[in-house]
Image (tube, rainbow, N blue to C red):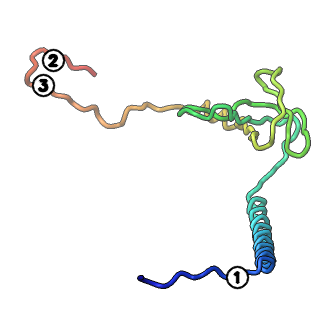
Amino acid sequence: MYGLLPERPRQVDMHAYASDLRQNLDTAYARARQYIGLAQKRQKELFDKKMNFKPLRVGELVWLLDSGRMTGKLYRPWTGPFRVLQTIGMVNYKVQSVERPSMVMVVHYDRLKRCHQRQEHQRETLNTVEFESTRPDRPQRHRRPPMDFENFVETG
């Protein structure tokens, strides 16, 4: 007919095929382990470079990330403030709500953010700012009444 004749099955030694396959798979697995190890080291270096872990002190005020419901336009993810009561291990902290002292919980460092309160001089300057008139310095615009209305009342 048309084309080439199909190849006939070759006689393959099964033991040689199995040993070659095992050797090829072992080298592939070894190479994959090597590349995975290099990738892990590179990712750890990048993570450690960006990590800025600064331990919290007992008595410090912090905000707590509320990850329960993270939806809505006006959602405020940080609640609190909370006071740090105790350090548990390297990254866990026991915190107590300032508003509700009965609310005590143990949370991870990743869910906490330092609470920076305004300085006294900032509060004073905010309270002592005198607001000037909001009207512009230019004269007020003169509005002519519409020609269609006889009983036009000007407001303003």
Marks 2 and 3 close (CB-CB < 8 Å): yes
Determine the CA span between mark 1 and mark 2: 109 Å
Q: Amino acid at mark 1?
A: Gln
Residue hosting label 2: 152
Q: Residue at x 75, y 73 (%)?
A: 28
Q: Residue at x 89, y 46 (%)?
A: 90
Q: Is residue 88 above or below residue 144?
A: below
Tag 2: Cα neighbours inside 10 Å, few (<14), some, or many (≥20)? few
Q: Is residue 139 left or right of residue 71?
A: left
Real-space CA distance between mark 2 and mark 3, rounded to the nearest whole angstrom: 8 Å
Residue type marked 3: Pro
Image-quadrant location for residue 108: top right
What label sits on residue 146 in the rendered view?
Answer: 3
Q: Which of the marked residues, 3 or 1, is nearer the chain's N terminus? A: 1
**How would you rate the neighbour count of disc 1 (Cα within 10 Å): few for under 14, some for 14-19, many for 20 or more?**
few
Name the kind of residue labelled 2 in the image: Phe
Residue in the image at 44% along x and 83% along y: 3
Q: Nearer the viewer, residue 86 or 130?
A: 86
Mark 2 or mark 3: whose residue is earlier in sequence: 3
Closer to the eye: label 1 or 2: 1
* Image marks 3 and 1: residues in contact by CB distance under 8 Å: no
Give residue 41's quadrant in the image: bottom right
Could you give the CA–CA distance between mark 3 and mark 1, rounded to whole angstroms?
Answer: 106 Å
Q: Which residue is mark 1?
A: 11
Residue in the picture at 61% in, 30% down: 127
Q: Nearer the viewer, residue 156 or 96?
A: 96
The secondary structure type at the circle numbered 1 is: loop
